[in-house]
Image (spheres, grey):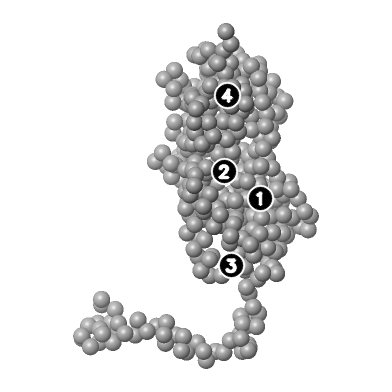
Amino acid sequence: MNKEKIILSYSGGLDTTVIIPWLAENFDYEVIAVCVNVGQKEDWDGIKKRALATGAKDCIIVDAREEYVKDYIFPALKAQAVYESSYLLGTATARPLIGKILAETAHKEGASAICHGATGKGNDQIRFELAIKAFAPDVKIIAAWRHPKWDMDSREAEIAYLEKRGIPVPMKKDQSYSRDENIWHLSHEGLELEVPENEANYKHMLKLTTVPEEAPESGEYVSIDFEKGVPVGVNGQKLSPAALVDELNKIGGRNGVGLTDLVENRVVGIKSRGVYETPGGSILYFAHEMLEHLCLDRDTYQFKQHIALKISELIYGGKWFTPLMRALNAFVDSTQNTVTGNVKLKLYKGSIRAAGSSSPYSLYNESIASFKTGDLYDHHDAEGFITLYGLPTAVRAMMEKENGLPPQSL
């Protein structure tokens, strides 16, 4: 009798390296490991060999880099979606895509279950499972960390589990940060970061980004071309979505830009601290906003800021595949029709600053903005505008005076 198949979301990291033998010891599934390449720098051949050596029946590797950047990162960028003022949603944008691919693979392979290694305290369990439910509501989900048969309560316990079974541990003990890497960012949690009073040990931790104090003294200029809100070129060279982000990661990384140290509010109600390296993403967000300042009118820009906050909450909370998300993305897309042009930036020791922008759809009019009087704007017109604009303030002041009240007392 053939065994039922289970799809395991496999990264080759500590959690999923443990889960393959754990599934073998506690269930009677045929394990198919699925690795989704969203830009993490991995030895994919080595990961596949590790999965098979630890008991997986097969290991499927899906290259989703271009899809990830084009269909997940760039929509978040166009929205200017930032969670809690700092987090550029690196992990949060990748998880829905990974969940979708797991669901599609489960149907293709005829699997009855999907397993993931997200912890019961984190956000990823929600993001994976909402995506799986959107595409495969008929497939059972096993969350190892929440299962009654899972008796490991820390990364140290997982390491001991592997060592007891003679399975190589896929990390050094002093580098056991909980990390998530993709083409957009690299996140770090754990170790000294679990104590908010501790300064992050950047020299020990960082992998994509130069410690800002050690970045080149000369700094570096970078030029980015956009078409309808989407970045299409760097320094005059047209690039595919993934290649463009890769190039900006290199440029931003060597100049120390894109570091965030944030204590954030997880979906489950826990505060957690993470350090995020997002060099290319930070450059793109800065450049895109510069172009929006040039090309969007005030009402559209200000309303879009409200939409950006809601989109960031939806993405962070795993609600990518929802009607509201589709509707808000449609609004954002409509605002991007004129967000086309070029932005130049200066990068210097962790900082990003504007160095000029241009667009054929620019709403900046030099003849109006100049301090010189021109045909399109007469300084005297402002007098009547201010009278009407300030009328409510003047009427209230007169009422207070008539009633013998101190100014601004009501």
- Give the number of the mark in front: 4 or 1: 4
Residue 372 image point, x, y percent: 63, 87
Q: Residues under labels 3 and 2: Cα distance?
A: 26 Å
Q: Amino acid at mark 4?
A: Ile
Q: Compared to 162, does 299 lie above or below?
A: below
Element at label 2: helix
Q: Residues under labels 4 and 1: Cα distance?
A: 32 Å
Farthest residue, direction left: 403
Q: Which mark is residue 157?
A: none
Looking at marks 4 and 1 on the same chain, the residue that comes earlier in the sequence is marked by 4
Image quarter in which the C terminus is found: bottom left
- Frontmost residue, 405 versus 253: 405
Looking at marks 1 and 2 on the same chain, the residue that comes earlier in the sequence is marked by 2
Q: Looking at the image, which residue is at 49% across and 47% down?
A: 323
Q: Residues under labels 4 and 3: Cα distance?
A: 46 Å
- Give the number of the mark in front: 1 or 2: 2
- Give the number of the mark in front: 1 or 3: 3
Q: Residues under labels 4 and 2: Cα distance?
A: 21 Å
Looking at marks 4 and 2 on the same chain, the residue that comes earlier in the sequence is marked by 4
Crowdedness near tag 1: few (<14), some (14–19) or many (≥20) residues, C-alpha within 10 Å:
many
The residue wearing badge 1 is 280
Residue 158 image point, x, y percent: 52, 22
The residue wearing badge 4 is 7
Looking at marks 4 and 3 on the same chain, the residue that comes earlier in the sequence is marked by 4
Q: Amino acid at mark 2?
A: Thr
Element at label 1: helix
Looking at marks 3 and 2 on the same chain, the residue that comes earlier in the sequence is marked by 2
The residue wearing badge 2 is 93
Looking at marks 1 and 3 on the same chain, the residue that comes earlier in the sequence is marked by 1
- Frontmost residue, 212 versus 4: 4
Q: Compared to 112, does 354 lie above or below?
A: below
Q: Looking at the image, which residue is at 53% across and 12% down?
A: 28
